[in-house]
Amino acid sequence: MTGHAGLIVVTTLRPAPGRRDEVLALCAESQERAAAAGGCFGVQTCMVGEDLDAVVAISRWRDRHSLRALQAAEGGSPSIQVRDVLIDVPVTRQYAPVG
């Protein structure tokens, strides 16, 4: 199936008080870079109904290699700007579809 993701990445971010809009803006910038990267099928930023303090970024990738290529191009870690607007380290989980 064309466009079927081989890797789904879900990152949960916890904005510092009063910094949600900045986190959303940083997510939008990150989405643009990921969407332009080879092997990215889509990126979305979501609010969590059960956890209104959380912001979740979800991306779909052809494979791990595609994600690693973007991470290498960006230096492999979040910028200091991102860490400044969060109350905790982002939690990232990677999922491999089974069907």
Image (cartoon, helix red, strand yellow):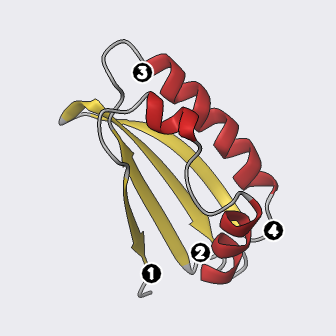
Q: Looking at this rendering, what residue extends furthest in the top direction?
A: 18
Q: Is residue 61 above or below residue 18?
A: below
According to the picture, the residue beneath numbered tag 3 turns out to be: 20
Q: Quadrant of residue 36?
A: bottom right
Q: Nearer the viewer, residue 15 or 76?
A: 76
Q: Nearer the viewer, residue 29 or 73?
A: 73
**Can you tell which of label 3 and label 1 is closer to the viewer?**
3
The residue drawn where x is 33% and y is 24% is 16
**Label 4, label 3: how many angstroms apart (C-alpha)?**
29 Å
Q: Is residue 38 above or below residue 12?
A: below
According to the picture, the residue beneath numbered tag 4 turns out to be: 38
Q: Earlier in the sequence, mark 1 or mark 2?
A: 2
Q: Secondary structure at mark 2?
A: loop
Q: Earlier in the sequence, mark 3 or mark 1?
A: 3
The residue drawn where x is 59% and y is 32% is 26
**Label 4, label 2: how many angstroms apart (C-alpha)?**
13 Å
**Label 2, label 3: how many angstroms apart (C-alpha)?**
29 Å
Mark 4 residue type: Gly
According to the picture, the residue beneath numbered tag 2 turns out to be: 5
**Can you tell which of label 2 and label 3 is closer to the viewer?**
3
Q: Quadrant of the N terminus?
A: bottom right
Q: Position of residue 86 (x, y in %)?
A: 38, 33
**Do labels 4 and 1 touch, CB within 8 Å?**
no
Q: Quadrant of residue 98?
A: bottom left
Q: Quadrant of the C terminus?
A: bottom left
**Label 1, label 2: how many angstroms apart (C-alpha)?**
7 Å
Q: Position of residue 87 (x, y in %)?
A: 30, 33
According to the picture, the residue beneath numbered tag 1 turns out to be: 97
Q: Secondary structure at mark 4?
A: loop
Mark 1 residue type: Pro
Q: Earlier in the sequence, mark 4 or mark 2?
A: 2
